Amino acid sequence: MPCYLITGGAGFFGTILKQHFLAKGAHIVSIDLEPDSFSHPHFSAYQGDINDNALMEHIFATHKFDAVFHCAALLAHVKKDLKRLWQANVNGTQNVYDFALKYNIRKIIFISSNCLWAKNFDSPVSENETPEPVEIYGKSKLAGERILLSKPDKINSIIFRSPTIMDEGRLGLLSILFEFIDENRKLPMVGDGTNRYQFIYAKDLANAFELALKADYSDIFNIGSDNVKSFNEVYEYVIGKSGSKTRLFHFPKLPMVWAMKICFWLGISPLGPYQYKMIASNFIFNTAKIKQKLGFAPTLTNEEMLLRAYEFYHQNKQEILNRKDVSAHNSVAKMGVIKLLKWLM
């Protein structure tokens, strides 16, 4: 029975990933800052910090891992302490890497991000495009990539540069969108809504992890959905399928971006530099490489996965609003000044 360590195993994607591999007959060990109530005969959970050397030593000495799935990360819009974010995302990655080296683990699979860029791209972005992160989360992911690729002769690191991971249960900033739709309010759009922005279905990403286990090399892969439609088309699909009376309301791009920028620096908006730069931009990954080298094939489109996520929110809203001590992607985001905009729409 193979044994895998998942960092961030109590989070939104960590939960999907452990279920995927448990169903395949693996033993899964999780470490996460948040408590994990998940139960399975072949699952072990540790609550703690990946920078806690005593805990990490105990975990690695107790279990013989065939690979490490490094999913743990703090988000900039959740943790105001940016030093803490850097320590968790960069120092934490270094610690995971050092323990993998010490215990002769040959495979690490890591979730990086499309936050390595924050500009509009007219054509799909390849793995050769030079990263230019504008905020600390993207910078921390780039630093993590460099750590994991530092000794390819010792550890095979597969890095997935991922857009927003989507499935039922995904919340975070998306909960703001879902609340507008659920309450049949006008949905404010920045710009004309013709821009396209890619997602990845969580179960497709979990399948990519399984495919990556077979790779006996280190590499970086873009991952994402196919047939990406405009935000207008995606939102209209979700609104139509859900029976909501929500209508799209478009604001001019430039003044809205400046307003979001000012609100962020005043501390009254959850949308940080990456979000307000990209909210009306085009960003799609070129995924030819992962299809060719790993045989990856996405199964759901943006609109299909966003509908799944909204329906889960709609059906479980009260339970979601009462959640405590869960990861950022499993909880609703605070609206800040957006709440005022909601009541004016």
Image (cartoon, helix red, strand yellow):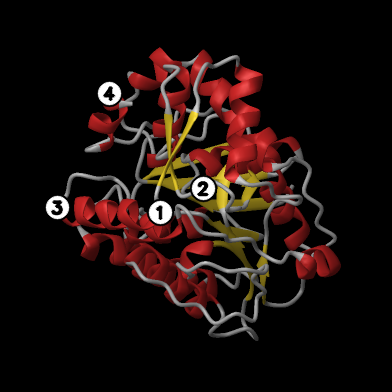
User: Disc 4 and disc 1: Cα gap in Å?
Assistant: 21 Å
Please report whichever mark, 3 or 1, sits nearer to the chain's N-terminal start: 1
Q: Nearer the viewer, residue 78 or 58?
A: 78
Front disc: 4 or 1: 1
Q: Secondary structure at mark 2?
A: loop
User: Disc 4 and disc 2: Cα gap in Å?
Assistant: 22 Å
Please report whichever mark, 4 or 2, sits nearer to the chain's N-terminal start: 2
Front disc: 2 or 3: 2
Front disc: 4 or 2: 2
Q: Image check: 21 left or right of 187? A: right
For disc 4, the neighbor class at 10 Å (few under 14, some 14 to 19, many from 20) is few
Q: Residue at the spot x=56%, y=80% of the render?
A: 149
Q: Which disc, if any, is residue 253?
A: 1
Q: Which residue is mark 2?
A: 192
Residue 329 position by quadrant: top left
Q: Residue at the spot x=34%, y=63% of the render?
A: 53
Q: Which residue is mark 3?
A: 266
User: Disc 2 and disc 1: Cα gap in Å?
Assistant: 8 Å
Q: Position of residue 167 (x, y in %)?
A: 60, 35
Q: Residue at the spot x=36%, y=31% of the render?
A: 332
Relative to 78, does residue 154 appear above or below in the rendering? below
Residue 124 visible within the image: yes
